[in-house]
Image (cartoon, rainbow, N blue to C red):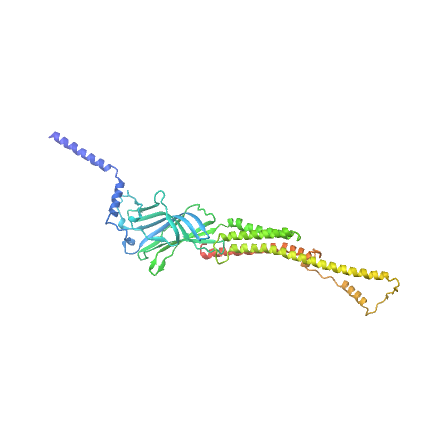
């Protein structure tokens, strides 16, 4: 009996040790995840066609909270009025049918890569032109199911979105490009989209754009009503400011230089016809080429842009410099014609005086007539002398500033053409400086005013 009791004691102790070792063995949580997934998503247990219930299990609409992370913005096209963006899109909602036991907090969440296994909101991007998912190396998408039934859906997508632009202030403009997300089939009675509280939109640090700067963004709601019902909608407005330094270097400074080069013809002699014509035509053609190149990179809109005003006025100044030479050339030829006519008239008078003196010299028998010392009051010669004395006795008139400035150029051949050149040397730069003052003050003020109206200040 003692030996039997001893045997049963050893057996009992061995059983207790085996049970203790089994309990202390590591639990295979992957197997647990499989069992949980089979439990909540098994055949006949979950129907992905049925939407989740409302808040706290009510019959209200399912609430889906959305947030996005902007990874990059590759381009903003002015011609097609669109922009391309790559973002991480996230949705989160609660589906009480997906609750499971977390094994005392050891299962934080379940991960799925197949979106068709659970119910998904029918969200779409209403202003999308093109879009695609990323599948390298694996599809960039996941679904996380938390123990309380909360579902997190995350996916990386690239989109090309429409961005209607107002180019009246181009290139001193700011553009607002929107990203709109709405429900396609579920009305607000069944599905409501809300922005995630706290930080609904994140933007990658050091976001670089070649010609724009992302100044700020604003989230809002844009629910739409149609004849089939009201649909929930979210939108985020991105405010882009155009980088002006590029256009200053590539457009504004070259146009100013062309206008200034066209003024060089005012300092050339009016007789240098080939030099002045070639200079005027070259600057005019260069300015026209510059204008056509600028318009080629913009859509053909029906209104006048700020750059159109600038190039149009610069082209007018260059064309005016060419017309000024035509006026100078005409004035020069007119002055030359007048000088030739005066010279012919002087030659005829001199010839007549010479002929009269020859007649007096040949008449040797002519009697010498004494001129009277005293003239009668009615004598025409006396009246002429008196008029000359009155002229010399009149006080001199004070000349005006313009006449004083113009009197520096003597009245000789081509004097009018020289005066036109001198006036153009002063007038053209002054008018162009006045235009610059009005242009920059007007468009910079309108830019600030439009920003205040848009509510982004």
Looking at the image, which residue sits at the far bottom? Answer: 378
Residue 246 rendering spot, x and y as whole percentages: 51, 48
Residue 4 rendering spot, x and y as whole percentages: 12, 31
Residue at left offset 76%, top offset 59%: 347
Residue 78 rendering spot, x and y as whole percentages: 46, 52
Q: Nearer the viewer, residue 225 or 216?
A: 225
Q: Nearer the viewer, residue 368 or 301?
A: 368
- The reply to whether residue 171 is in sight is no
- The reply to whether residue 193 is in sight is yes
User: Left or right: 362 with respect to 240?
Assistant: right
Q: Nearer the viewer, residue 363 or 119?
A: 363
Residue at left offset 18%, top offset 35%: 15
Residue 70 rendering spot, x and y as whole percentages: 40, 48
| Image label count | 0
User: Left or right: 158 with respect to 322?
Assistant: left
User: Left or right: 109 with respect to 417?
Assistant: left
Looking at the image, which residue sits at the far left? Answer: 1
Quarter of the view holding residue 357: bottom right
Q: Is residue 344 above or below residue 76?
A: below
User: Left or right: 295 with respect to 69?
Assistant: right
Q: If the image is split into quadrants, where does the N terminus sit? A: top left
């Amino acid at each position: 009996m003692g030996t039997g009791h001893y045997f049963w004691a050893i057996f009992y102790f061995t059983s207790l040790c085996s049970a203790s070792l089994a309990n202390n063995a590591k639990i295979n949580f992957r197997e647990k995840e499989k069992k949980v997934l089979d439990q909540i998503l098994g055949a006949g247990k979950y129907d992905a066609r049925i939407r989740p219930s409302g808040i706290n299990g009510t019959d209200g609409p399912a609430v889906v909270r959305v947030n996005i992370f902007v990874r990059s913005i590759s381009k903003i096209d002015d011609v097609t009025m669109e922009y391309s963006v790559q973002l991480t899109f996230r949705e989160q909602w609660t589906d009480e049918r997906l609750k499971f036991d977390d094994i005392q907090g050891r299962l934080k969440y379940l991960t799925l890569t197949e979106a068709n296994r659970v119910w998904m909101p029918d969200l779409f991007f209403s202003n999308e032109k093109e879009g695609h998912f990323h599948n390298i190396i694996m599809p960039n998408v996941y679904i996380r199911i938390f123990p309380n039934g909360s579902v997190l859906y995350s996916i990386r997508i690239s989109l090309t979105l429409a961005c209607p632009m107002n180019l009246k202030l181009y290139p001193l403009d700011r553009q607002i490009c929107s990203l709109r997300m709405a429900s396609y089939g579920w009305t607000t009675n069944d599905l409501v989209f809300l922005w995630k509280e706290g930080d609904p939109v994140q933007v990658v640090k050091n976001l670089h754009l070649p010609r724009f700067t992302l100044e700020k963004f604003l989230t809002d709601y844009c629910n739409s009503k149609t004849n089939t019902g009201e649909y929930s909608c979210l939108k985020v407005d991105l405010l882009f400011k155009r980088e002006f330094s590029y256009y200053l270097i590539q457009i504004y400074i070259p146009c100013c230089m062309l206008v200034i080069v066209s003024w060089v013809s005012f300092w050339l002699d009016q007789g240098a016809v080939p030099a002045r014509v070639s200079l005027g035509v070259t600057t005019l053609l260069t300015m026209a080429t510059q204008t056509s190149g600028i318009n080629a990179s913009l859509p053909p809109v029906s209104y006048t842009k700020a750059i159109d005003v600038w190039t149009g006025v610069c082209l007018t100044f260059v064309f005016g410099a060419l017309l000024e030479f035509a006026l100078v050339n005409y004035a020069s030829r007119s002055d030359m014609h007048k000088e030739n006519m005066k010279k012919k008239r002087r030659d005829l008078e001199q010839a007549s005086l010479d002929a009269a003196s020859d007649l007096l010299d040949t008449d040797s028998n002519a009697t010498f007539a004494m001129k009277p010392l005293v003239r009668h009051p009615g004598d025409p010669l006396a009246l002429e002398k008196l008029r000359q004395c009155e002229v010399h006795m009149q006080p001199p008139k004070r000349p005006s500033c313009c006449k004083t400035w113009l009197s520096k150029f003597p009245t000789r051949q081509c004097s009018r053409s020289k005066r036109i050149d001198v006036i153009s040397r002063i007038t053209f730069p002054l008018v162009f400086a006045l235009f610059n003052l009005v242009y920059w003050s007007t468009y910079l003020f309108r830019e600030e005013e439009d920003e205040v109206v848009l509510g982004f200040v």
